[in-house]
Amino acid sequence: MRPTIFLLLLIFSFMDSQAGRITGRVTNEKGEVLPYASVFVKGSTKGTTTNNQGVYFLDLDAGSYTLVCQYIGYARAEKAVKLEAGNSAVTTDFSLVVQQTTMNEVVVRANAEDPAYEIIRNAIRKRKDYLEPLDSFTCEAYIKTLMKTRKLPKRVFGMKIEDKNKQEMGVDSAGKGIIHLSESLTKIGFKKPGKIKLEVLSGRESGSGGYGFNFPTFINFYKNNVNVLSDQLNPRGFVSPIADGALNYYKYQYLGSFWEDGKEVNQIKVIPRRNFEPLFSGTINITENDWRIHSLELMLTKQSQLEMLDTMTIRQIHVPVSKDVWQTKDQTVYFTFNQLGIDAVGTFLNVYNKYELRPQFEKKYFNNVIVRYDTSVNKKSKAYWDSIRPVALEPEELKDYKVKDSLLAYRRDSVWSPAYIDSMRRNQGKITLDKVFWADGLRRYNFNKERPAEITWKPLLKQVQYNTVEGLVAGVSATYRRWWPKAGSVLSFTPNLRYGFSNTHLNAWGTLIFAKKKFERDGDGITSENSSWTLNGGKRVSQFNQANPIWPLFNSVYTLFDRRNYMKIYENYFGELIYNKRFDNDLRFSAGVLYEDRMPLENTTDYSIFKDRNKIFTPNYPTEKLVTQFTRHQAVVASVKLEYKPGQQFIEYPNGKQAVGSKYPTFTLSYHKGIEKVLGSDVDFDKWKFSVSDDMNFKLRGMMKYRLSIGGFINDRKVPIQDYQHFNGNQLLFASEYLNSFQLAPYYANSTTASFYATGHLEHHFNGMLTNKIPLFKRLNWHLVGGGNAFFVDRNNNYVEVFAGLENIFKVLRVDVVASYLNGHKGQVGLRLGLGGLLGSAINFQRK
């Protein structure tokens, strides 16, 4: 009996030590709720935040506590609470009154400086002391992300938003509803200097098997340059109101002071000196004597160079975690978005708890994995979330979870049922003429659990082109993919047909790819390809420069309207085998071997829409290097390529890793070997290339991008024109690929087989640093970009071009004026139109 009695005593003692929940509502004097107010236990970091309805709860052990309630702009309130063993709940409401500030007695003089400036100077002097006040610490961050629409248009970019799509997003017929809701719990570890690790303990996303938004939005106003959520919002960052040079950017107004817990707190209004600078506006509260941030409410708008969003408001409350150290207790970021007819709002809520100031980290705890997901991160129960959630869910959030999670469970349970499969197949839509000829999205999926497969179709009109060799060109292309989910493998096959109506040549080739996927995040669409084999073969048309510097659509336009046939092509029977491997340290390796039977092609038509007797089409070969057409020959070329970025950091998921970047540049080494006599090959050469490239963000001073390369031929005994080192030129109005081409250089005039060459590409994106100083013009939010490109082979073959332009024109376009110098002599000046800016850069990235 004694062991049983002892066990019962342990159980009862455990039950006695537990208490119920403290719950309540926070309102102002008028009874209006105060959303996201901070409620915490005095003398500790245990606390919570009210939800959008002003409701909070706290789970505490039995005992007596003093609860503190804070909300920016209101006087702090304290209430004593006693929790007795066995109590299920205690209700404690707070009614906060507007903060009454008092103005210190000052002597008024003509042109006297506002007292706020001296307070800010003191805060600036102390900034570095508070930047990283702890040698190390750990804490937990609860993150809730909510995004909802208030209105949706009927069409976006001409595409109709179907009712079924609205229903899938959780939006009603009026365009209102929650489109994203997620929660996560993340453990944060920090150690000087600047070492950080995030361990995502749990995450959930409404209606999805994904992990939600898991990364705490550290917005540190002790930094000179404040990063807010993402560089996409402004790559320059934003100037802190207490940055070293803040007095050059801001005006300040002393609003008075108030006393809180025996400490005087100064309230300062923050006012940008100029519009269209990356500056905050709002209020920051600074403690007297120790000059630290007590709390703040700061806003960003379009006039703050805020991109993508319309407004953003940041609220922070800082509390002491030890005698001399304060940390952020909770942080709320509100944003609004109203563009393209889409009216949306959102909230990022961070609640920080369980600060530990002297943690013991295991050896090598801080490594190149900066974010690690627990193996059961998205498999937690509803009871788990109810037990750890520090912020009560709102009625609409409870409904969103209930409805969308039920639908998700239904889909998972019935996804392979005949009725569901038939329904999904019907939802793929009909095969219409616009999808066949122009619109993307013609896709057919078989919805087979064991043997999933799909077919995608490339629109016919997007494959039409025109050139002087083939005349009108028509093409057909489709891709078939088949997955083996258990093995993590995928096989794809893409057949291609191409027919030239003038030379009546039919070309047919295909690409077969077998890939092993390292991991695939359920619900987030992130995949990592561990290795792949690619087999190409058939008969095709290729440009002499295999980097394909001329886009066929642009060549078609110039040929038809300006009688310029810049693109030079040849025909070839070919076979190619390529192996790609990506290692866990993000070292990328590829090797391949290519066989080509190269056949010359001649012009067969001189048709153009506009006739000009002074413009004659040039022969179909690089006339700058060849006096006559090349002779048919065979080539076998082996290649190997290594790409590595040192110091790469990773996110580690339960079933794989994803690289997220490094402060070091990317190094690339490639080698090509022309092999003679194998399969009748007529080539014999060895060439190499080494490159260094990087994007360097200087924040307020803009972003610099560069690519530097050296290379050459070790052996050039037999080098056909196709295997020369070509410098990607451009003779069109439309800009070619930035950082990998020369905007005014001819396509083949400088091609070489020299033993050594060097190239350099550099451009600096000022991101508004200079243009936001120009009256009226700054309202356009167009940004200056400048730089240069150069290559050097020898004294008789060298080239330099410099350019300056404007980008972010309507968020998409970029215009450059370029001046060139060839072999030390002034060349030409030209204009180039391209894609650049917030959306244009993203489109350029997609094209690459």
Image: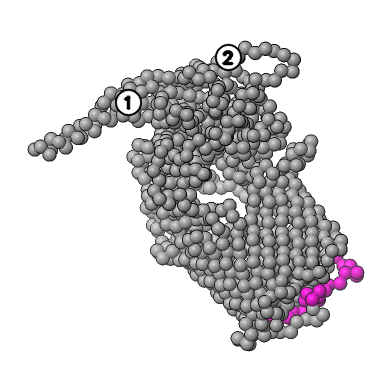
Mark number for residue 174? none
- State the residue at coordinates (54%, 34%): 129
Disc 2: CA contacts within 10 A as few (<14), some (14-19) or many (>=20): few
Q: Nearer the viewer, mark 1 or mark 2?
A: 2
**Cα distance in 3D space between marks 1 and 2:** 39 Å
Q: Mark 1 belongs to which amino acid?
A: Ala
Q: Which residue, as the protein is rendered here, is positioned at the far right?
A: 614
Judged left or right of residue 119, residue 790 is right
Q: Mark 2 belongs to which amino acid?
A: Thr
SS class of the residue under badge 1? strand
Pointer 1 and pointer 2: residues touching (CB < 8 Å)?
Answer: no
Image quarter (top left, top right, bottom left or bottom right) of the N terminus: top left
Can residue 174 be seen here?
A: no
- State the residue at coordinates (59%, 28%): 123
Query: In the image, is residue 617 part of the stretch drawn in magenta?
Result: yes
User: Does residue 296 lie above or below 4 as drawn?
Assistant: above
Q: Earlier in the sequence, mark 1 or mark 2?
A: 1
Mark number for residue 89? 1
Q: What kind of secondary structure does the magenta stretch mostly adopt?
A: loop
Judged left or right of residue 820, residue 814 is left
User: Does residue 306 lie above or below 671 as drawn?
Assistant: above
Judged left or right of residue 389, residue 145 is right
Residues in magenta? Answer: 598-625
Mark number for residue 102? 2
Disc 1: CA contacts within 10 A as few (<14), some (14-19) or many (>=20): some
Question: Where residue 529 sits in the image (x, y, percent)?
Answer: 50, 62
SS class of the residue under badge 2? loop
Q: Colour scheme used in the picture?
A: one colour
Image quarter (top left, top right, bottom left or bottom right) of the C terminus: bottom right
- State the residue at coordinates (72%, 64%): 759
